[in-house]
Each structure stands twice: as C-alpha cells, then as structure tokens.
Image (spheres, grey):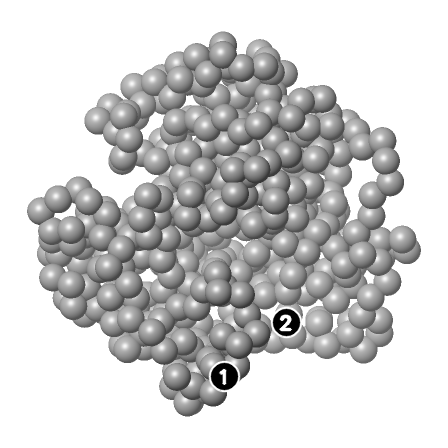
Amino acid sequence: MSSLHHRHLAVSPDWLALYYRHPLEITHGEGRHVWDADGRRYLDFFGGILTTMTAHALPEVTKAVSEQAGRIIHSSTLYLNRPMVELAERIATLSGIPDARVFFTTSGTEANDTALLLATTYRRSNQILAMRNSYHGRSFSAVSITGNSAWSPTSLSPLQTLYVHGGVRSRGPYAHLGDGEFIAACVADLEDLLGHARSPAALIAEPIQGVGGFTSPPDGLYAAFREVLNRHGILWISDEVQTGWGRSGEHFWGWQAHGRNGPPDILTFAKGIGNGMSIGGVVARADVMNCLDANSISTFGGSPVTMAAGLANLSYLLEHDLQGNARRVGGLLIERLRAIGAASECVREVRGRGLMIGVELVKPGTDQANPEAAATVLEAAREGGLLIGKGGGHDTSVLRIAPPLSLSIPEAEEGAAILAEALRSVG
C-alpha cells in the first residue's frame, strides 16, 4: 500500500470508493492522456467520470481560468457577474427551452436537487416519477429518486418516488418486444401507474442512463411519455448531466432523441461543461424557474472562474465541432468494440452512442451479470495503459467508455486494441 493510499484510508469514509487494487494517483494530463505519480502514461477513456469533456489541460480553458483568477475569483450571486450572464445566455439559447432561465450550481447532484425543488413547488406535489436503473446524484433528495440500490443508501426521503419502466432496453419484462411495442408497453405501464397514484410533480429521466451502464430506451419513448404527462400537467425533467453537450454524437442534448413533443420543462446539466471545473445548473422556462416564493442564492454556483472556464470550453467545443467528432470517432469505436465483443463469450452487449459506450459482461453461457469480470478487465486495461470506468444496474458489470470528445481515430484504435487484450483475461 502506498503512503498516500494509507493516508487516504485514515481520513476518508469507508464508502469513498477507489478504483483498482493499487489505487492510482493522477498527477497531470494533456489531451487525451494522463500520467500517474510513477510517470506512467495512460490513455484516458473515462475523463474523470465524463467530466474532462474536451481535453486535459486544454490551453483555451486554462488560459481563461488563469486570467479570471488574476482579476477576481469569487463574488457570489449577490453581485452582477458578467461571465455568468454570458454563459447563461448561451446555454439558454442552446437548451431549446422557450423563455428559458438558467441557475448555476456546483454539481449535477445540486442541479437535480434544485430541479426537484422547482417541480414540487410548481406542482404542489411531493411525488416524483423516476426510471428504474437511474442515478441522479448523492444528496438526500437525489438518492431518494435513484433507481439503483448500489447508489441509494437510504429509503428515507422528502419525496414519494414511483419507478417507471423503459430506461433499459435489453433487460426486464419488455425486452423481447420490438421498439414500437416496447414503447407502447412502457406508456401503458405509465398510464396504469398514474391511475393508482396522486398526481406527481414531474418525471425525471436520463436520456442515456450513466451510472446504470449507458442503457437507453428506443428513440421517442420520452416523447410518448410526454403525451401522457401533458394530459396530467406533470413536468418533464431531463437529466443531461452525462448526456449533454454533444457526447452522444447524434444530438447536442439527449432529450432531442425524444423531442417530437417539444423540449423538457426542466433540463439539468453539469460535468462536461466545466471540463473539470465545478459547474452544474438548471434550465427551465420562466414560469417554472420563478415559482419559488422564498429567497434563494448560490454562494459558489456561477463563480467568475468556473464561468470563464465554461465559456472557453463551450466555445472550443462548438468551434471545433466536437459533437461531430464524437459521432464519427465514436461510431468507429463502437463498431470496433462490437467486433471485439463478438469474439468473447463474456460480452453480452456493446451499446451506446457517440463517445458514450457500454460493454456489458456476463458469465459465459448465461445472461447473469459478471461484476468479477468487469473488475478484472478494469485492472487489465490499466496494465495495458488504458483507463475506463464501470457501472451497471443489479450488479456492476458494465465497462463504461467515455473519452474526451476530441479523441482521434488513432487513439480510438489504440484504446480498442488495449481493451481487446484486457477482455482476453476473462475469456
């Protein structure tokens, strides 16, 4: 055990997990690579949990942070803040929500917590619809609507949560159905659920479930849900903490794959927009955002430094068409991984869009989750010089692959080759 690991264990909670048998200390990064304390270089296919969205040490972002820090680091939302207003203007326009208002937080958890406060206040209801296999953060309210027991440590809640089918396409009671029948069955389930409940405040859903293992429904499910929700006056919250900013390649926001009936009432974001700086936020139409009848501010949300980083990062992403790069390079990487997976008895499915890819592992010859194999492949990939993540529903048996959106084709090929070798360690 390293000295730093020993010190970590002495002062950190037991539930604060670390990857790897011998945890990694990352000291610096550049582009799509990071280095550890021993000077070893790794290709980064996880980006600090989908947070280093454009590149490590992106000059445009580090320059913006440095220059803003040299002027003023902090002021709070009690004062006018030019970088905050400028970034809010850009996000409001990009969101697709009419008459949008933007509130900045410091994390996706806090963004979802704010969205829940807005929805329950606006609707005067403490009931929330959430998806099975979902994850929405670690605050008291966020864990209470998380449909994944591995990340929800308490059943106590300020909310009553009702879970809906549909977030996982290839498992569950409707998995055998075609896409159209799958959507119809999930809508019928939602209709039935609402017949047994008081009117909920909102449905919160990740268009692609992140911690759940990059699972998603067929396109159009949430549009079909929206028809039901609208009849009941129920709001739709799209949790875009992991799917936003073009990561899926096909769309800038995940909700756009389900946009037939318009944008969500509330959209939450975080992670990638700051490229490592602590930015989260909520976008909502004005009547929803303005429904609070008590004071509310944010001490650290929208700080001048993080807003400067977000502006520079968003500008770089748009000017270099990183959404298009995610579509092109991600499409190549998915096909490469599917070819590799076809040769392994442990790979049940390779799924995803753009640079948001899941490789689900099972016990050979069965449909049973294989968390041991996922842990083994994670270690083997690290030995090969590749960092990936893991997740999944009932058991953590999905390899999560989400590199910075500037990933090149040679880097995608290199990462796929390392992962192919790592998968051989489990058959």
Q: Quadrant of residue 386?
A: bottom left
Mark 2, Cα crowd under 10 Å, few <14 / some 14-19 / many 20+, is: some
User: If the image is split into quadrants, where does the N terminus sit?
Assistant: bottom left
Q: Residue at x 84, y 53 (%)?
A: 77
> Is 285 situated left or right of 329 in this image?
right
Mark 1 surroundings: few (<14), some (14-19) or many (≥20) residues within 10 A: few
Looking at the picture, tell me which residue is in the foreground, 209 or 395: 395
Q: Is the residue 110 above or below the residue 309 in the image?
A: above
Residue 421 falls left or right of residue 351: left
In percent of the image, x 86 and y 62: which residue is there? 75
Q: Spatial distance from mark 1 to mark 2, Cα to Cα?
A: 32 Å
The circle on residue 367 is none
* Residue assigned mark 1: 4
Residue 401 in the image: above or below residue 95: below
* Amino acid type for the residue under numbered disc 2: Glu
Q: Is residue 95 left or right of residue 193?
A: right
Q: Position of residue 293 (x, y in %)?
A: 85, 31
Q: Which residue is mark 2?
A: 60
Q: Secondary structure at mark 1?
A: helix
Query: Is residue 236 found left or right of 422 in the rendered image?
Result: right
- Of labels 1 and 2, the one closer to you: 1
Mark 1 / mark 2, whichever is N-terminal: 1
